[in-house]
Image: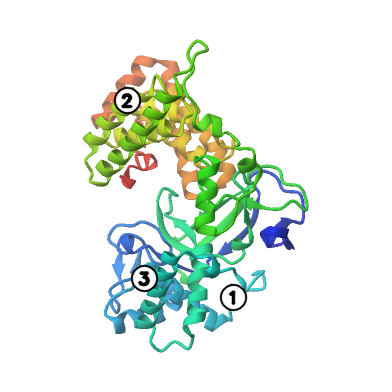
Amino acid sequence: MDNVELFDAGEKGKGLRTTKDLKAGEVVFTEPSFAAVVFDSLSQQVCHNCFRRQVNLHRCAQCKFAHYCDRTCQTACWDEHKQECAAIRNKGKAPNENVRLAARVLWRVQKDTGIVSDSQLISVDQLQDHLADMSTDSLKELKINVQNFLDYCPNTKHGSEYISHIFGIINCNGFTLSDQRGLQAVGVGLFPNLCLVNHDCWPNCTIILNHGNQSSLNATLHSKKRIELRALGKIAENEELTVSYVDFLNVSADRQRALKHQYHFDCMCKSCSEHFKDDLKMAAKETDGKKPSDELVKEVQKYSLECLAKIEAARAASNFNEVVKLSRECLEKQEPVLGDTHLYKLRVLSVASEVLSYQHNFSEAAGYARRMVEGYTKLFHPNNAQLGMAIMRAGVTHWHAGLIEVGHGMICKAYAILMITHGATHPITQDLESIRMQTEMELKMFKKNENDYHSMREAALQNKPTGKMTMSGGLTNLDLLSSHRL
């Protein structure tokens, strides 16, 4: 924490600011989780120690709930799991993720008094719970969670009031953890220092979970579930550090509502106050200086929302042909009316490109992905992690479609962004570097002889020997298209 200091941020309460000038991509600080748990729905698919998605995980023989990559991960996690293991055995089943996380937090508070190292700037007890700001429904849910906790940990020394305080802290400060590829949310954790970084819709930092190297056979050398706070651009000494708590791909009013509901504050950042880029996000299409009527725009927007709900339902049911059909119909209706940066159009383009890639219809997927990236580029901060991931997927899609020149260009652009947002050691950056080298080699082959390149590409697609230089790794890296999220 040498790069930061705690300060009074006025109406926002406490905050963190820099103690020196920082440059783009620099790690401001790192922090292991105080406590973290895997989501209920993924408890058998994600390692409970390193939070990596794996196949054939080993189950804890005692509680039969926790799953691990191997004995090394299980040993590394035992200190955190042992009380949980006994509680699950006594209860007969595991409670929901909120109760499990609250229990892990309380067990660690009891063991380490809420501060686990000299670098922790604030104790867990001092974090805001916002119980007084909760709605009636939220308080009812809180009461149920507290009762479930008491059933799960009947011998706890803590009273209901303190347990409610911990649940309130988790509700306001819990951070979603992703898998090793950064493509899917797999759990939730509490990071006390990170909780001190205030929100801005156009922030100067981003948060990345870096799983590190789990290859060591020595459990003590395994990296913890660790976040990195990274600078998105130059940050001057004494400047406040900020991150975004919500997705920027919403208009300011929707972001403000989400922040008020979840975090109980009124966002008055510059982006919200000036409605930054709201006009682009809701833009109508302009042709020869003319725009469609307001009534037509409203009609198509309403249709788009209804169609997006149907698309999501079809995707949840794995009816991917229906997703594609609905997406094509919706885009046809949107095309003459909504602008290329309109949020509803971008959402349809995103889903359509993902599903078509999953179906290996790369040619059509590439067209949608390119349009999506063009819209994102006009909306996002140039070093936004979400933008980098989108360009990466679009680049891989173009590569698989045989559009090697465009694909390689996108992959290089994505790599430049992810080097800032994720860093060189992150698994997804390392994967992307391998793909960049592969596409660079293929681009040289393409420029040397297009016919030979396409012949070898077809052979690789059909898994046939070429008798020439093979395209190792080519046309196989579909993980980066995030199709497993479907």
| Residue 339 in the image: above or below residue 421 | above
Residue at x 65%, y 71% (from the top left corner): 122
Of residues 14 and 433, which is closer to you in this image?
14
Residue at x 48%, y 78% (from the top left corner): 163
Gap between marks 2 and 3 measured at Cα: 45 Å
User: Where does the N terminus fall, quadrant-wise?
Assistant: bottom right
Q: Disc 2 designates what residue? A: 364
Let me know if residue 474 appears in the view.
no
| Residue 128 in the image: above or below residue 434 | below
Query: What amino acid is found at the position of numbered circle 3 in the picture?
Result: Arg
**Residue 315 position by quadrant:** top left
Which tag is nearer the camera, tag 2 or tag 1? 1
User: Where does the C terminus fall, quadrant-wise?
Assistant: top left
Q: Disc 1 designates what residue? A: 125
**In x, y percent, where is residue 4?**
71, 59
Gap between marks 2 and 1 measured at Cα: 53 Å
Badge 2 density bin: few <14, some 14–19, many ≥20, Cα 10 Å: some
Find residue 71 and name its label.
3
**In x, y percent, where is residue 462?**
23, 29
